[in-house]
Each structure stands twice: as C-alpha cells, then as structure tokens.
Image (cartoon, rainbow, N blue to C red):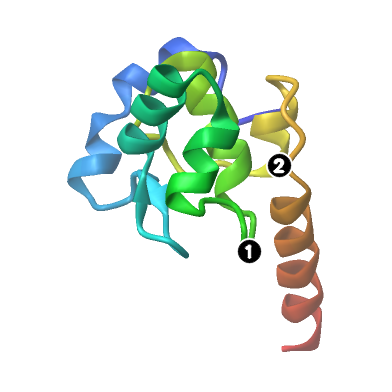
C-alpha cells in the first residue's frame, strides 16, 4: 500500500519543505520544477523544457516527479517511492533501480 493516498495529500505536506525534505528540482542539472513547469506550459511541451534545462538526462530520478508535478501543478513534492508513483499510473524505473540497489546493499551490510 502506498504511503500517499492522492494528490490532495501533497498540499498538506508543507512540513517536509520546512524540514528540507521536499523534492523541488532535478539535482543533476539544478533545474527547479517550477521553472520546468513554466517552460513546458509556455512552450507547449516537456521536450522544450528538457532542451532548455537538461532535466532527466543524467540519473533520471526526477522524471517521475516531473510527470507528477505536471499532473498536479505541485512543485514541492514529498520524497516518493516507486509504489507512490505506480498508484498514480506513473512509471518510475530509476527509482525502482535505486530501491533494488538499496535492498541489496542492506543485505550485504
């Protein structure tokens, strides 16, 4: 079961932002979700935003967050796992890969 019930729950999680736990940007390219959203809406596509910011071209962990952000218009998102994205029909292969790595690492330590 996902930790998050629906998109409305994100509006109630401002404490995460205050704690520094909000996911707000592509860390590889320092591209803020608000900037990505603004470009995508003004240019008419996420591809245009990608070309201008580079988001998603390195580790890919930001891609499902950006898809979620475009659906909800929320730019400060909680830390989410693959099941959270799957509950919303968003694939998250880079996060699945990270989860598998963390699971394996915990078995060897």
Tell me the residue that label 1 is attached to: 59
Q: Quadrant of residue 37?
A: top left
Q: Nearer the viewer, mark 2 or mark 1?
A: 1
Task: Please provide percent x and percent y for residue 49.
Answer: 48, 37
Q: Kindly tell me whether residue 58 is visible in this rendering.
A: yes
Q: Say if 24 sits above or below 107 in the image.
A: above
Q: Is residue 19 left or right of residue 31?
A: left
For the point 71% across and 41% down, which residue is it? 82
- Horizontally, residue 101 falls left or right of residue 85, namely right
Front in this rendered view, residue 45 or 81? 45
In the image, 56 versus 52, the foreground residue is 52
Would you identify the image quadrant in which residue 39 lies?
A: top left
Q: Residue 12's quadrant in the figure? A: top left
Q: Give the image location of residue 53, x and y in percent.
A: 43, 50
Q: Are circles 2 and 1 on residues that touch, CB within 8 Å?
A: no
Q: Position of residue 63 (x, y in %)?
A: 61, 43
Q: Which label is found at residue 73?
A: none
Q: Secondary structure at mark 2?
A: helix
Query: Which residue in the structure is indicated by mark 2?
Result: 82
């Amino acid at each position: 079961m996902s930790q998050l019930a629906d998109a409305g729950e994100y509006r109630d999680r401002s404490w995460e932002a205050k704690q520094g736990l909000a996911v707000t940007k592509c860390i590889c390219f320092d591209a803020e979700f608000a900037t990505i959203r603004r470009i995508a809406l003004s240019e008419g596509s996420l591809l245009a935003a990608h070309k201008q910011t580079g988001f998603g071209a390195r580790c890919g962990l930001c891609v499902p967050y950006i898809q979620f952000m475009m659906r909800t218009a929320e730019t400060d998102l909680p830390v989410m796992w693959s099941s959270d994205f799957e509950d919303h029909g968003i694939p998250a292969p880079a996060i699945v890969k990270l989860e598998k790595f963390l699971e394996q690492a915990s078995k060897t330590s």
